[in-house]
Image: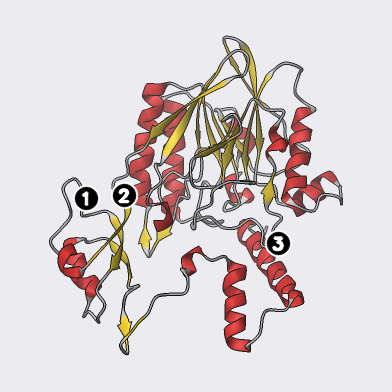
């Protein structure tokens, strides 16, 4: 069985005020071409198809065009699960009808989940799609009050599938979660503020390969059979050193997975550069694209008039300027931390200390955490 594993497309993403739909269309065109020459038996998309619950029209059109080309031009089945950014109601429209055409949309974690069975020359392979497992939704679906965190929810859903697998058959899980020990990026929305958002790799011991979504850096666990494909593109400057790819998986007759990382080439890269303004205005080095999305760190210590305007004459897509060495009143200042790398709870705690002059009390921290969790849930679920 040969399949492509991808995730975290985040269609409709806005990056520092720039709509990325054209960039995403370019990379998805490359992805569809990849399907043409690699000829997989299936395509797995492990969640966060859209960047928000109510995606813009152009994002919906791009997904429709891409999936249509995969199904009609290449006749390859596609298995899609909902991630924490997706709305189950919107992503799952027409699920039963589309399954007949080879598009398997699995959007809710409930008792009705069943494997998608695809054959190869060695027999059937059982694909077990587990959409983003909100603990409260899994608790309600299985009527089990003991399910209180993500690890318990994922364990329950994995057991649900394991009970349906015939002995000795090959099985592949497709899910969207934060696996303990994974390397995070700043562009991922936290799944929980209370420290219970992680799941353990032991949840996936029944599967020969686990195709993960959520973390944007390509990475593997254990014997490389539990893997994140990583995001389709770079969605933050913290990802500037990432090598974005999709994972081509070859599952042999015994269920052993061989992996190949196939890189994708964006129309515009996301890069970080630094230097003095006069040096940077000389233009890019050989081989560098002046149209890339850039974060520029200026070493100049003094005030500069319209630095971003000057830089954009050379680099039209400068999106952020950092001034860590800016001198104010004769004193060299540097920031106490990068707010883009700080979690919501840490930011609120810092704000509270600055305004109230004391540390955030535990009871108020709990109230704030609960309120943000409810906000995240509301964003994911569109009211009927």
Where, by quadrant of the figure, is residue 95 drawn? Answer: top right
Q: Residue at x 44, y 56 (%)?
A: 13
Label 2: state its secondary structure: loop
Q: Residues within 10 Å of mark 2 (few under 14, many from 20)?
A: some
Label 3: state its secondary structure: loop
Identify the mark nearer the N-term, 2 or 1: 2
Residue nearest the viewer, comparing 42 with 199: 199
The disc label shown at residue 268, or none: none
The disc label shown at residue 269, or none: 2
Spatial separation of the CA atoms under disc 3 and disc 1: 42 Å
Q: Residue at x 53, y 52 (%)?
A: 184
Q: Residues within 10 Å of mark 3 (few under 14, many from 20)?
A: few
Instruction: Report the side of 319 relative to 279 (left or right).
Output: right
According to the image, label 1 marks what residue?
A: 289
Where, by quadrant of the figure, is residue 176 drawn? Answer: top right
On screen, 23 above or below 18? Answer: above
């Amino acid at each position: 069985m040969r399949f492509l594993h991808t995730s975290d497309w985040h269609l409709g993403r806005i990056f520092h005020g720039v709509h990325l739909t054209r960039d995403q269309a370019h990379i998805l065109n490359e992805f569809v071409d990849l399907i043409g020459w690699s000829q997989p038996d299936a395509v797995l998309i492990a969640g966060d198809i859209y960047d928000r619950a109510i995606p813009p029209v152009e994002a919906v059109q791009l997904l429709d065009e891409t999936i249509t080309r995969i199904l009609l031009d290449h006749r390859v089945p596609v298995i899609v699960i909902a991630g924490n950014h997706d709305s189950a109601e919107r992503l799952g429209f027409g699920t039963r009808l589309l399954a007949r055409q080879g598009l398997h949309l699995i959007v809710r974690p409930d008792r009705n989940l069943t494997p998608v069975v695809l054959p190869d020359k060695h027999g059937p392979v059982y694909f077990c799609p587990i959409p983003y497992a909100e603990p409260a939704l899994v608790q309600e679906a299985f009527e089990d009050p003991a399910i209180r965190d993500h690890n318990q929810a994922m364990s329950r859903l994995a057991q649900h599938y394991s009970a349906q697998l015939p002995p000795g058959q090959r099985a592949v899980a497709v899910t969207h979660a934060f696996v303990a020990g994974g390397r995070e990026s700043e562009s991922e929305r936290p799944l929980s503020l209370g420290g219970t958002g992680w799941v353990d790799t032991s949840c996936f011991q029944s599967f020969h390969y686990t195709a993960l979504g959520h973390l944007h850096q390509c990475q593997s666990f254990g014997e490389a059979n539990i893997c994140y494909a990583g995001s389709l593109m770079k969605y933050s400057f913290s990802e500037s050193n990432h090598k974005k790819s999709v994972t081509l998986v070859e599952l042999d007759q015994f269920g052993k997975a061989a992996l190949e990382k196939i890189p994708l080439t964006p129309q515009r890269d996301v890069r970080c550069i630094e230097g003095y303004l006069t040096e940077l205005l000389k233009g890019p080095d050989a081989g560098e694209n002046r149209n890339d999305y850039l974060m520029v760190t200026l070493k100049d210590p003094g005030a500069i008039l319209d630095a971003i305007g000057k830089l954009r004459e050379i680099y039209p897509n400068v999106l952020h300027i950092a001034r860590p060495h800016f001198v104010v009143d004769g004193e060299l200042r540097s920031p106490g931390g990068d707010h883009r790398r700080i979690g919501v709870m840490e930011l609120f705690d810092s704000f509270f200390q600055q305004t109230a002059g004391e540390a955030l009390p535990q009871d108020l921290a709990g109230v704030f955490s609960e309120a943000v969790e409810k906000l995240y849930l509301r964003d994911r679920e569109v009211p009927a």
